[in-house]
Image (cartoon, rainbow, N blue to C red):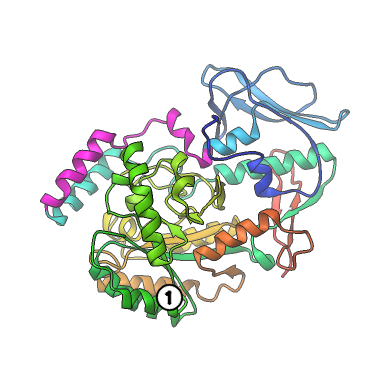
Amino acid sequence: MTAASPVHGQALERLLQPTRAAAIDSAAGTGPPEWLVSGRWRVLAQPRFAGMHGTEIERFDLASGQTVGAVHDTAAGSVWIPFDLEEAYANYVTEAWRSRARDRALGPWQLAAYYRVKPLLPRSWWLLARRAFVRWSGLPAFPVWPLDDSVFRLVSFYAHCVLLAADVPEATFRWFWPRGYRAALVLTHDVESADGLRVAIELADLEESRGFRSSFNIVGSDYPIDDGVVRELQERGFEIGLHGLHHDRSLFSSRTAFVEQLPEVADAARRLGAEGFRSPSTHRVIEWLPELGVSYDCSVPHSDPYEPQPGGCCSVWPYFLGGVVELPYTLPQDYTLFTLLGSKSIELWLSQVEAIERRFGLVQCLSHPDPGYLGDRDKRVLYAEFLEAVADRSDVWRPLPREVAAWWRRRDSADPADPELALGVMRRREAHTYASLEPPAR
C-alpha cells in the first residue's frame, strides 16, 4: 500500500470490527510487494521472513521458491503474520494487484483509438470485434470470474487469527447489514441514451410491481434529459445517479481532463439530485475517485474481465475510498451475460446471487434500459424473470444504493446500542480451515 492509496488506516479491522482484542503481529516486509500463494489463494504484499516460533497455521509460497508461514505462539498468546494484513486488503480493493498481474487489457493509446473509431462503425461490427477479443484473451487466472473469494478468505483468515491469539473458540463482530439481514441487493441501471431514459419508466414499473426500487444513472451532457421522466422516477421513490458527463473515457483520460471536468460533474450531480456516481464503461483511476464529491461510487467491479478496463476489487462488501463509499457491482453486466456471451438464461445471475448471499455480501445488478440491452423485449423478459426469482428473499435487504452508503457510514461509527446494529459470530473451525462468519438471529 502506497502513501497515495485512498484506503486509510485499519481498513480490514474497520470492515470486520471484532469485539475481542487480540495480539496479532502483522507488518510489512522490506522488499517490493509480491504474490504470496497458498493453494488457490493469492495475496499481494511485502513478505517478511523473521518470525516467531510456534505452530504454523498457514504457509505461503513465493515466486523465488521460498516459503513463509503464519505462526501461532500458544505460550505468548499471539499470532505472527508474514505480511501486513492491511496492505493485503488495500492491494485488493484499490486494484493495486494490477501492477503484478499479466492481462491483455487495452493500453491508453488503444483505448483512445477505440473511442475515436467507435462512432464511425456500426454496432454489429463492434459486437463481433468484442466477441473475438473475448475469445482471444480468455479468462484471467485472477481475479476469478464471476466470483473471486480473495477478500472473503482474507477476512476469514483474519478472524481465525483473532480467535487463536485470544484463545477463544468464538467471538462477536459488527454484522454487515442492518437488523441482521444476511445480505443486501441493489438494482442499478446506466442510461446511455434518450431512448434508454424513456424505457426507464417500463423498468421502474417492472420493479415496483415486485417490491423493488432502483437507481438510474444518467449521462450529464450526451443526450437530452427528459426532466419529466426524472421527476416521475424520483417521486416514485427511485434514485437518480450520475453516469459521467460524456459516455467515454474522457474524465479519466488524464489528470488534467479530470480536474477540468470536476466542476461540471458537481454541477450535473446537483441538477439531477444525484448522490452517487458510476463512470462510463467503468473507466476509473482509483486514487481520484474520492475527489468526485459524491456520497458513493459504483464504478469498481468485484471481478469483470469483459470491460474495456478489466479488473476487480475482489470484495463482496462495500468499502471506503477516502470519504466515498465504494459499492462494487457484483453480478455480470446484462450486456456481458445476454449479448457478449449470448446467454438466454438468468442461471448465472441466480447462482451468483446464491454465492454472494452465502458470503453475506452485496448483490449489485448493473443493467441498461437502452436498445441493445434491456430495451430489447427478449432481454427485458429475462430481467423480469430475475426480479421474480429474487423477490421473495426475506433475509436479503433491498435498499437503494444511497441507503447502502448511508448504512455503511452508520455501521462504521455506530454506537453499540444502535438498534439497527447486530452482532455476528466468528467461530473457529477444524484444522486447515479458517473461521466461519455466522449471521445473527433475526
Please say if 51 is above or below 163.
Answer: above
Q: Nearer the viewer, residue 348 or 29?
A: 29
SS type, badge 1: helix
Q: Nearer the viewer, residue 344 or 236?
A: 236
Can residue 303 be seen at all in this image of the molecule?
yes
> Is residue 119 part of the magenta span, yes or no?
yes
* Residue assigned mark 1: 234
Residue 269 in the image: state x and y as whole percent: 40, 60
> Is residue 186 part of the magenta span, yes or no?
no
Does 78 sit left or right of 260 as displayed? right
Q: Residue at x 25, y 40 (%)?
A: 111
Q: Which residue in the rendered view is the most extreme toward the bottom?
A: 209
Q: Identify the image quadrant of residue 418.
A: bottom right
Q: Nearer the viewer, residue 435 or 95?
A: 95
* Main secondary structure along the magenta-highlighted residues: helix
Does 145 sit left or right of 378 as displayed? right
Does 288 sit left or right of 442 as displayed? left
Q: Which residue in the rendered view is the most extreme toward the right?
A: 75
Mark 1 neighbour density, 10 Å: few (under 14) some (14–19) many (20 or more) = some
Residue 124 in the image: state x and y as whole percent: 15, 56
Residue 35 in the image: state x and y as whole percent: 53, 27
Please say if 260 is above or below 297.
Answer: above
Can residue 40 be seen at all in this image of the molecule?
no
Q: Identify the image quadrant of residue 379.
A: bottom left
Q: Residue at x 62, y 21 (%)?
A: 67
Three-letter residue code for mark 1: Gln
- Looking at the figure, which quarter contains the N terminus? top right
Residue 327 in the image: state x and y as whole percent: 50, 54
Q: Residue at x 31, y 60 (%)?
A: 219
- Looking at the figure, which quarter contains the C terminus? bottom right
Q: Nearer the viewer, residue 374 or 28?
A: 28
Q: Which residues are magenta?
A: 92-121
